[in-house]
Image: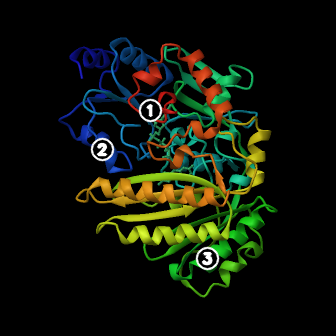
Amino acid sequence: MSATVLHLLNDAFPGKVVTSGSDAYDNETNTPWSQTCWNPAGAYVQLSSAQEVAEALKIVNKTGTKFSVRATGHNPNAGFSSVGPEGVVLDVRRLQSKTLREDGIAEVGAGNLWGEVYKWLEDQKLSAIGGRDRQVGLAGFLLGGGMGAFPNLYGLGADGIKSFELVLADGSIINANAKDHPDLHRALKGGGSNFGIVTRFDLDTHPLIKVLYTIKLFNPSDYENIIRATISAQEAMEKDNRIGLFTNFNNGFVAVGLLYADWPEEQPQAFEPFEKLESLMTTLVPPTRGTLLSLAETMGHAQEPKKRRIGSVTTKVSFDLYAQVYEAWTEITKTLPEGMVLHYTIQPVGEAGVEAGQVRGGSAMGLQKVPQCWWVFTCEWPQAVSDEAAERAIEEITDKTKQMAQEKDLLLDLMCMSFATAGQKVLSSYGADSLRMLQETAAKYDPTGVFQNLQNDGFLLKNSV
Ligand SMILES: Cc1cc2nc3c(=O)[nH]c(=O)nc-3n(C[C@H](O)[C@H](O)[C@H](O)COP(=O)(O)OP(=O)(O)OC[C@H]3O[C@@H](n4cnc5c(N)ncnc54)[C@H](O)[C@@H]3O)c2cc1C
């Protein structure tokens, strides 16, 4: 990275520019969730206000410097929120403001974690729709759509965004909402980092959401019954939007999260098929009357540093398809090198979730109103094992799932940004109309293409077809 840029950054942000040769630099480099993103940058700039973000963007723009924007670095795609020695990471983690307006809207800085926002809101007996893990950052989650524990209750995380404060390519700071820049408001809901750097999200809040949850581990050999129980809960979801569920097929166990957005006297009937399974190995988390925060704390355990890669597919709901995916996964796992784990999660979204988003103004994502499964495939491996096998495994399982779904006419176009691997054409998957809308919006708000050309990588419009 050029000495001029470093000089300008140091001048503008004394004490906030971290370069190599310090513990702080190693910490910055090793922040991302996946070691595939531990790519030492030329500099990390720790920004703590929208004005500072604007100033930093002006400097990188003026000097033609490559940059990445990072909230908490949970996206495992190398180069998205990381950049090599030639570039600078604009780190927004310190944008941690939290203000509750009289009208109940929560204005929260883009650097907050979901755990921090849930805690602050719950102290005021309120909730917002966010992630299932306390450590995940607001920014990447919300800009990619964001699936919470109960997608059918109030829609996706992005559906609850009343307004974005963001810094445009020319350094101006604007708000995008239903009244001001409504085109940008819609585009940002699922449109990722193509339009500007978001500095604040204004979120809809709800009276405190109580959560009854339990996590059970089953023996994978019973996969047919586990899938039947999963599908039965998905069917029940279409009638009761308080049901939440995840079924994670993993190395030697299947983890099932049975979630309900209230504290009923008894475990909801929808979960009975799981109670009857004889393949229960253990109840990892006993039935707990908690909240979104306590659930996110339960889910958000510290994870070992590992390399990670993910992939996304969306399909309709079908026993035969779910069973075929399990069988394909079993075959692929046999070919993996020692130390590498491939696991996947069935994440249901119901019609009510899609409708809840439409009622709130819709997003860029073009969701179809059908019961669906957002599959996420995750590969994790240690540094010593080669990356190629992981790339192959993710490609093979996503391709096979797509192909099997297509043969049964069950494939949906959508790929969710939160769960997609770098090469997946996420923005195209939203449909031609959405893609055109996103392209037009980017051309209007970033006419010189700073976010396409200087931004290091991401689900960018320039790579979307
Ligand atoms: C343990 C774990 C649990 C997860 N749980 C869920 C879940 O429950 N539901 C779900 O939907 N997803 C979940 N995810 C996926 C997660 O939402 C995405 O990885 C998301 O991108 C992470 O957000 P981040 O702010 O940490 O992202 P980062 O990695 O920091 O950034 C992700 C992308 O957003 C861009 N970006 C970041 N900040 C800004 C900004 N302020 N303005 C513009 N662009 C920005 C970056 O440049 C990058 O392209 C989970 C991921 C992990 C690792």
Contact between marks 2 and 3 (CB within 8 A): the answer is no
Q: Is residue 303 visible?
A: no
Q: Nearer the viewer, mark 2 or mark 3?
A: 3
Of callouts 3 and 1, the N-terminal one: 1
Residue 333 is situated, as x and y percent measured from the top left of the image, at 40, 69
What residue is rendered at 25% in x and 42% in y?
A: 26
In the rendered structure, find residue 226 and report the number of the disc placed on it. Answer: 3
Specify the amino acid type for callout 1: Val
Q: Which residue is mark 1?
A: 92
Marker disc for residue 9:
none
**Which coloring applies here?**
rainbow
Can you tell which quarter of the image residue 39 is in?
Answer: top left
Q: Which residue is mark 2?
A: 38
- Residue closest to the far front: 407
**Which of pointers 2 and 1 indicates the residue nearer the eye?**
2
- Ligand 1 within 8 angstroms of badge 1 C-beta: yes
Instruction: Check the image and report above or below for 137 versus 382.
Output: above
Kind of residue at badge 2? Trp
Q: Is residue 255 visible?
A: yes
Q: Distance of mark 2 from mark 1, alpha carbons?
A: 17 Å
Is residue 245 rendered to the left or right of residue 334?
right
Q: Residues within 10 Å of mark 2 (few under 14, many from 20)?
A: many
